[in-house]
Amino acid sequence: MSEIPYGHYFQAVIFDLFGTLVDIFKVSEYKKNLSDITEALGLEPGRFAAAWKDTWDAFPYGNYPSVQARFALALELYHDSAAYPRPGGLQKAITIRDDYIRGQAFKIKDGTIDSIKWAIREGYKVGMVSNCSMETALSWKQSPLAKFIPDPTFSCLVQLKKPDPKIFLNETNKLKVDPSRCIYVADGDDHEFDTVRQLGMTTILVKYNTDDAYRHEPFPDNEHSITHFRELPAIVAKLEGAMRA
């Protein structure tokens, strides 16, 4: 991997999680998961899907206190009255949801850990900012990535959400770095690049096949992009060189 000669300008490399360090959610998999949950509960699919979506009004940052709490609210919203799942169905549904979200956070992309190790060896601080629900935060310590990023910023814990600049400043404050001397590596969803550029960060776009990808927007225009993490060290070295020029 590339080495950065003569020290470096940037102080930290900050990553996004879903679509960046780990695979993006798939629309088909999300729909299948919701279908499995509804079947376990024994409820009408369309009505429960609408109630499940409406729970985000109460928990806009993914900050429900537990998976059980979100299910309880969804069942209250189901046709404006209490819904009673089949016996044993609720616990089965909770397990299905929990396994799905936790499992996605463990789909680490090839080369990710090697690139993070490289950044740390080079002397960069490493951080992460993620819009995510509580399941991801609660299981983070079990992720192989937690060894390198032990205290990331999760929307569900700080009750902030991209593209709010405060969620990024929360991470740079924890790392004790200047935002203008940070590289932000992400897939650019949720208008996050608009915000981090205003904060002075340098952006690297992570691109992937968007067929079936659960995204909110198309990839933004960006000068620097990668499709595999083995490309990251060379781009960081190039950015460092430009700062010294």
Image: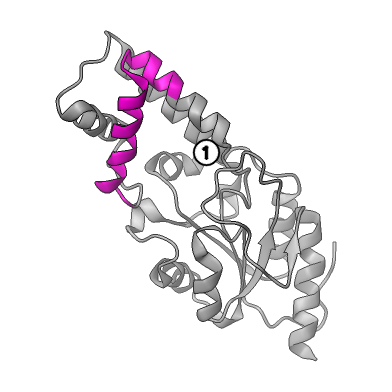
Q: Main secondary structure of the magenta part?
A: helix
Q: Which residues are magenta?
A: 35-60
* Pointer 1 residue: 142
Find residue 223 and report its image quarter.
Answer: bottom right
- Number of callouts in the render? 1
Residue 223 shown left or right of residue 77 in the figure: right
What secondary structure is found at the residue carrying circle 1?
Answer: helix
Q: Position of residue 82 (x, y in %)?
A: 15, 23
Residue at the extreme bottom of the image, as rendered: 245
Q: Position of residue 172 (x, y in %)?
A: 49, 72
Name the residue rendered at 41%, 68% in the picture.
Answer: 170
Q: Residue sitting at 32 percent across and 33 percent down?
A: 50
Q: Nearer the viewer, residue 145 or 90?
A: 90
Q: Is residue 27 above or below residue 121?
A: above
What residue is drawn where x is 75% and y is 59%?
226
Give the residue at x 67% y 63%: 205
